[in-house]
Image (cartoon, rainbow, N blue to C red):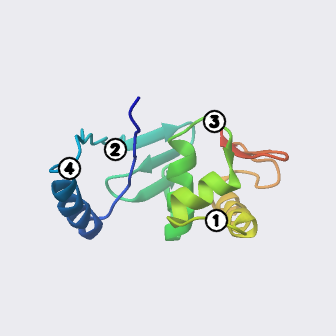
């Protein structure tokens, strides 16, 4: 059984990975697959335009930090799937996590203040106690 490696890269990182893959194909059999993210993630009252890197709530643009935006896209791309703080940290921060829990919690807190109609009773980003978070559209 083969292994699947999924990477999200910027343009410079992609060039480096292409060189690595070219070198590896001489030694092992690789099948390179590319996924294209949905250009627009749309939910009632919330729209994420990935190609433009913009978020709109009820038609009004919401300014997000890089970490807030990436966290929102990661959660919204996996609706109704419970993701642990470790999974979110590793996907968004692109590094292994030892003590990531407060970093993720802070970003979620700030994100909720910006996108939720009532941040104390969230509509989109739900807490799953003892596990992590899930995005409900």
Q: Residues within 10 Å of mark 3 (few under 14, many from 20)?
A: few
The first of marks 4 and 2 along the sequence is 4
Question: From the viewer's perspective, is 88 left or right of 49?
Answer: right
CA distance separating discs 4 and 2: 36 Å
| Residue toward you, 94 or 105 | 94
Q: Image quadrant for the N terminus? A: top left
Q: Residues within 10 Å of mark 1 (few under 14, many from 20)?
A: some
Q: Image quadrant for the C terminus? A: top right
Foreground label between 4 and 3: 4
Which residue is tagged 4? 27
CA distance separating discs 3 and 1: 20 Å
Foreground label between 4 and 2: 4
Disc 3 on helix, strand or loop? loop
The first of marks 4 and 1 along the sequence is 4
Which residue is tagged 2? 39
The answer to whether mark 4 and mark 3 are in CB contact below 8 A is no
The answer to whether mark 3 and mark 1 are in CB contact below 8 A is no
Disc 2 on helix, strand or loop? loop
CA distance separating discs 1 and 2: 29 Å
For residue 81, the mark is: 3
Task: Name the residue: 53% across, 71% down.
Answer: 65
Q: Is residue 58 visible?
A: no
CA distance separating discs 4 and 3: 37 Å
The first of marks 3 and 2 along the sequence is 2
For residue 50, the mark is: none
Disc 4 on helix, strand or loop? loop
Foreground label between 3 and 1: 1
Foreground label between 4 and 1: 4
Could you say where residue 9 lies in the image, as x and y percent from the top left? 34, 60
Task: Name the residue: 58% across, 64% down.
Answer: 96
Which residue is tagged 1? 97
Disc 1 on helix, strand or loop? loop
């Amino acid at each position: 059984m083969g292994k699947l490696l999924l990477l999200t890269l910027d343009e410079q990182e992609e060039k480096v990975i292409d060189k690595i893959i070219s070198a590896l194909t001489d030694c092992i059999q690789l099948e390179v697959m590319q996924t294209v993210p949905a250009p627009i993630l749309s939910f009632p009252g919330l729209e994420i335009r990935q190609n433009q890197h913009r978020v709109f709530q009820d038609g009004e643009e919401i300014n997000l930090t890089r970490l807030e935006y990436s966290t929102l896209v990661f959660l919204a791309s996996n609706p109704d799937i419970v993701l642990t703080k470790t999974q979110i940290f590793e996907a968004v921060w692109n590094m292994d996590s030892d003590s990531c829990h407060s970093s993720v919690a802070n970003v979620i807190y700030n994100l909720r203040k910006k996108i939720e109609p009532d941040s104390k009773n969230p509509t989109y980003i739900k807490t799953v106690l003892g596990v992590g978070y899930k995005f409900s559209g």
